[in-house]
Structures are given as structure tokens and as C-alpha cells.
Image (spheres, rainbow, N blue to C red):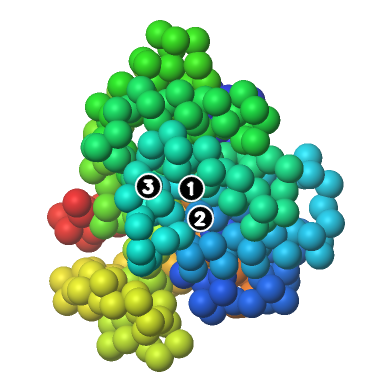
Amino acid sequence: MQYRRLGRSGLQVSELSLGSWVTYHNQVNTKAATELLAAAFDAGINFFDNAEVYALGQSEIVMGEAFKALNWPRLSYAVSTKFFWGLARTGNTVNQRDTLNRKYLMQAIDGSLQRMQLDFIDLIYCHRPDPRTPIEETVWAMSDIITQGKALYWGTSEWSAADIRAAYDIAERHHLHKPVMEQPQYHLFHRQRVEVEYARLYEDIGLGLTTWSPLASGLLTGKYRNGVPQDSRGAVKGMDFLLAGLTDPQKNEAVTKLVDIATELGGNVAQLAIAWANRNPRVSTVILGASKLSQLQDNLGALALGQKLTPAVLQRIDEIAKPLAA
């Protein structure tokens, strides 16, 4: 496992990390989460991703219980969470969800700390942009959370380059804590934002990336080429919004061709997809998802496969996947 600086910060994160979206609470209980975290840590992973909205707070609870059971030194790992959607789904939700206003953020961090049983969270993100709240208000609130010692670094997730730059400039003008990282989707079929839209931000403000969905929610495992397996993410209740992408005929045909390349290299298509995302020097860490130890162990095989991604191999991959990429 190699380690990379998170943008221009001094924090070093493992090139592969482990996230909890969909899996924790929905597919993975505390016992299984503890086993997965332990295996990841033993493999050199030191960054674990979460969000307030995952399983409506239950994901943070599961991860927090696992951390408590493992009792690792706090300096040995970094953990994140994200704010925007909140936990409320009924009743008076005007300041409880779909917002980045100060009132919500200052209470959201306290809720996450309580659920995860931590004194501070290493990385906090604005999970989506909020066009109804002035960016300046959001920047001040996120900076204040860090000043209070409740978090160490802050960033954004799925923000436009223009909004990220606006937030950075506000922070710089007022001598506040600046956004350090962005968490965008990045995989073989989703490239535009990371490779084009954010291009100037890497040099101009030192933006780091903690990218999610290297397997396109499972499409790039190849298991959706013949339908939706019952034990897959696509079959999880509430995940039906993924089905159109997972069952896309053209992309699944492309996956079949990518399987052939992966086999030639001595790996599988999931490892190939993870290795491809990891080879981008702008990516600080690639977030993996796993509901079973066997999945995690298999995905870690991407590290060895990455050494075989020569320019010629990368060109072959692009010829197959790039025409279908957004």
C-alpha cells in the first residue's frame, strides 16, 4: 500500500480506502464491519469514509461501534463524514435536510460525533451544493467547526469547479480554513468532472480527491451482464435508482471486452477498474465498498494489477470505455 498527500495538506491517506455507503447496517452489521475494517487496516488502509445520511445515521453508528471494538490508536487512521441530506424524512424538515446553512451544520457535526463515538472527525464534506444558502455562510460554518476542534479538514462532494473555487476564495479572503478536498464519482464511464472540469483546481488551489464508485456501483464487476443478482447492490431495497445504469446494454458489452483485457493481465475486471482509477496522480485515494471479506481481498488485488497498466494497455481500455464515458 502506498500513501498520498491529501491535496496540499500534510495528511497522508492510503491509495485505497474503505467506505460504508449502502453496505453498513443494510448489508453489514457491527460484527462484520469490525472484521472488514480490521482486514483493511491490516492491508495498510488508513482512511474510512462515511456520511450522516448513509442508512439514516445507522452507518455511522455501526462504524463507531467497530472502531470502539478495534481500539486502534487515533493517530493510526482517518475517518470522514458528509453533511447535506440530514436524517429527517418527515415533519418540519426545513432546516434539517437538503441544506448547508449554519444552523444545520453546527448541529450535524455534533450528531455525527455522538454516533461515531469520536472526539473529532478527520475529514468533513459538504455532501452536495446548496444553491439556497450563500456559499459564504457555509464556508464560515465549516471553518468554525474546524476551529472548534470537531474536525481537522473540510471539503466538498460533487460540487462544480466554480463553486469550489468560490468557497476557496471566500476562505482565503477572510483567513478561514480552506476546502482541501473534493469527493467526486470517478470510474471508466464517468470522467469529465475529474479529468476536465477540475483540471485547473489541482494546481491553482491544490485540490485533493477522495473518489467514489470506482466500480460504477458494481457495473464494472461484470456481474450485471446477465441481469441483477439477488445478493447484489442493485437488489438492495431503495437502490432501484441504480438499475438503469447497471443494466445498460452498451456498457455491459464494453465490460465484457474489459474482462478480456483483465484476464490477459492475470486479474479480473473489478481489479482492472480500481487500478485504472488509482493510476491517476490527481486522486489521493480510491474509496472501495465491500460487504464481504472476500470482496475486499479481491479488490485489494488491484494494487498488483496496477503495475501492468502500460500505456498500450491504457489505450486499449480507453478505446473500449471512453466513447461511453460522461
> What type is the residue that disc 3 sits on?
Asn
Residue 17: image location, x then y, percent: 58, 53
Q: Give residue 82's mark.
A: 1
The answer to whether any part of residue 230 appears in the image is: yes
Residue at the image position 38 percent from the left and 39 percent from the top:
100
Mark 1 burial class by Cα count in 10 Å: few <14, some 14-19, many 20+: many
> What type is the residue that disc 2 sits on?
Glu
* Residue designated by label 3: 95
Mark 3 burial class by Cα count in 10 Å: few <14, some 14-19, many 20+: some
> What type is the residue that disc 1 sits on?
Lys
Q: Quadrant of residue 102?
A: top left
Residue 71: image location, x then y, percent: 84, 56
Q: Give the mark toward the camera: 1 or 3.
A: 3
- In the image, residue 173 sits, relative to residue 198, either above or below, namely above
Q: Secondary structure at mark 2?
A: loop
Q: Secondary structure at mark 3?
A: loop
Q: Earlier in the sequence, mark 1 or mark 3?
A: 1
